[in-house]
Image (spheres, coloured by chain):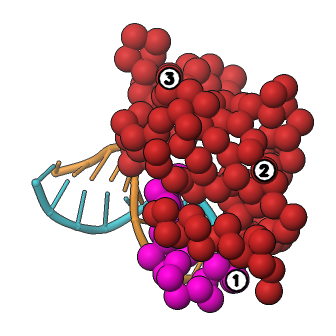
Chain colours: A red, B orange, C cyan
Amino acid sequence: MNYWLMKSEPEVFGIDHLAKRPKQTEHWDGVRNYQVRNMIRDQMKPGDQAFFYHSSCKEPGITGVIQIKSDAYPDFSALDPENEHFDPKSSVDKPRWYMVDVQLVRKFSRTIGLTELKNIVSLANMPVLRRGNRLSITPVTSLEWKTILKLVDHPR
DNA sequence: GCCAACGTTGGC
DNA sequence: GCCAACGTTGGC
């Protein structure tokens, strides 16, 4: 079982949106980066867990935990000309982009802010903390996972 | 709104 | 296959 960090803009789709979906489950569409697609398609498995990270907002940071609920399947938003993530190079026969279903596990009592994360030495290798990181999904080690969960239980 | 970082595109 | 130009992400 793997751990991940998944970024989303809360104005577009935040953890509170997910909380209101039926079964608190939604498909994670719109990934249009090959590295991220490959991780989704080849490495993500049902039962994996991920941090839900809010980006491009007032308080960027980790807001909760979600769980992967499906294997990867073709991202149908790429096939819809009306969709802002439409990709004419994708097709039903040769889907270029993939997605998974995710379900909310828990929303944290507070957001663990980017600044706070940056201050923790043992998290320094997390891609999300590096400037210029462009991947909307990145792997998290089990050590990083534990370290971050402790921050929720023991706020500073 | 600025700008660093990096992915993508397209001419050659 | 190179690489300049351009586009996007995302923190600040």
Residue sitting at x 66%, y 36%: A102
Magenta stretch: includes residue A125:
yes
Q: How far apart are marks 3 and 2 (CA)?
A: 25 Å
Which kind of residue does numbered mark 2 sit on? Answer: Arg
A53 or A93: nearer the eye?
Answer: A53
Q: Can residue A29 be seen in this view?
A: no
Q: Determine the residue positioned at 59% across, 47% down.
A: A49
x, y percent for residue A12: 78, 46
Identify the residue at the far top of this view.
Answer: A93
Q: Name the residue under label 2.
A: A106
Q: What element carries label 2?
A: strand
Q: Which residue is drawn at 57% across and 56% down?
A: A5
Residue at 62% x, 20% y is A80
Residue indicated by mark 1: A116
Q: Which chain carries label 3?
A: A
How far is mark 1 from mark 3, CA to CA? 35 Å
> In the rendered structure, which amino acid carries the disc numbered 1?
Glu
User: In this picture, which residue range is highlighted in magenta?
Assistant: A115-140
> Which chain is home to disc 2?
A
* First in sequence: mark 1 vs mark 2: 2
Q: Residues within 10 Å of mark 2 (few under 14, many from 20)?
A: some
Mark 3 — residue?
Answer: A73
Q: Do labels 1 and 3 share a chain?
A: yes
Cα–Cα gap, marks 1 and 2: 20 Å
Q: Mark 1 lies on which chain?
A: A
Residue A55 got which mark?
Answer: none
In which image quadrant can residue A48 be found? top right
Quarter of the image with the C terminus of chain A is bottom right
Q: Is residue A1 visible?
A: yes
The residue nearer to you, when weighing A108 against A38, is: A108
Question: What's the residue type where badge 3 is placed?
Answer: Tyr
